[in-house]
Image (tube, helix red, strand yellow):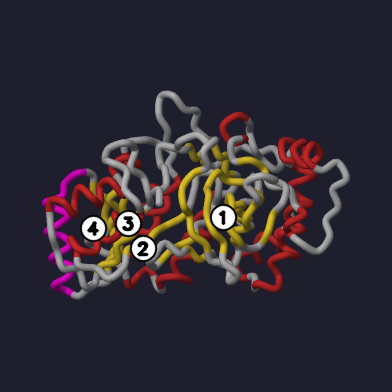
Amino acid sequence: MQPSLVNNIFSIHDKDFLNHATEIFKFQYEHNNVYQQWCNLVNPLLNINHSTSNIPFLPISFFKTHTVTATLFQPEQIFESSGTTQTINSRHLVKDINLYKQSFSKAFELFYGDIKEWCIIGLLPSYLERKNSSLVMMVDELIKMSNHSESDFYLYDFDKLQSTLQRLEMKQQKTLLIAVTFALLDFAEKFSMELNYTTIMETGGMKGRRKELTRLEIHDYLKQRLGVKNIHSEYGMTELLSQAYSKGDGIFVCPPWMKVLIRDEEDPLLVRTSGRGILNVIDLANIYSCSFIATDDVGMVYEDGSFEVYGRSDNSDIRGCSLLVV
């Protein structure tokens, strides 16, 4: 991959996205054997014109059954998805971990400003209990980057978390509590608070620990119990190196180097820029794996590029880190 293209990914403008996507597609088609075979299978007469809808998207399930890499390399990190004893976990071999760190740090700055102004608290018990979680690495790095004395991870010590949040509120300290959904519900059930300087961000994940609720029901309950106006959300996955964020109402926005398209539920090769269907993701940061992923997530993409996630398609595996159902 040309170093100049790698360096420019996180500073591109919308008008440059198609050119970057096309260049990365050509690179991955040439150097990713699994992706090349898939492209040749679905479109033997493949010809890239002027639309990303012509680029084939690799089914996300391939990360469970194949080694999806562009070029041969010794990975600096291997991310693995959560799962159950009945499922096969996805594995994402990461050639350059700095691409991931740049992606989430620049996205955080884009959506939330200077990380050093924040205290970062991670309530991620299910993730901390297993190895190779991309989410844990991201939050761990944000904790370090914030350089705040109270930034830390929490497992199940809700009493300590409550006293920490109260102390930060008294100091009027901007705080991000990023948490797996079932732990947030457990915490809110035990404590009722009035958080004026704390942003609550849920990452999804019920893992069968609670009755399945709709996103609206969960967010309404958390807003009522924790005294916040909106519940933020993060949309990311093991197979990607970028995340989208929602600042409320379940509407996600991508950073400039990431785009979500929609594919038809009946014709998976029909891809549109907006509408309802199943989500396809272009992640330009995922250079040395595959940047064009066909997910199992059903949703809606709006004309401005923002999107909602409704749940998983009926024929997909149930992931341990399952999204909320609507």
In space, the residues marked 2 and 1 are separated at their CA atoms by: 24 Å
State how far apart marks 4 and 3 are (Cα).
Answer: 17 Å
Q: Residues at badges 4 and 2 in contact (C-beta under 8 Å)? A: no
Q: Which residues are magenta?
A: 156-171
Image position of 33 (left or right of 216): right
Q: Residue at x 81, y 39 (%)?
A: 40
Q: Which residue is mark 4?
A: 221
In front of the other: 216 or 250: 216
Give the Cα separation between the discs numbered 3 and 1: 22 Å
Disc with the residue nearer the chain's start (2 vs 3):
3
- Residue flagged by tag 1: what amino acid is it? Leu
| Amino acid type assigned to the residue bearing label 3 in the image | Ile
Q: Residue furthest front?
A: 266
> Which residue does the image show at 61% across and 70% down from the upper left?
11
Q: Earlier in the sequence, mark 4 or mark 3?
A: 3
* Quarter-of-image position of residue 32: top right
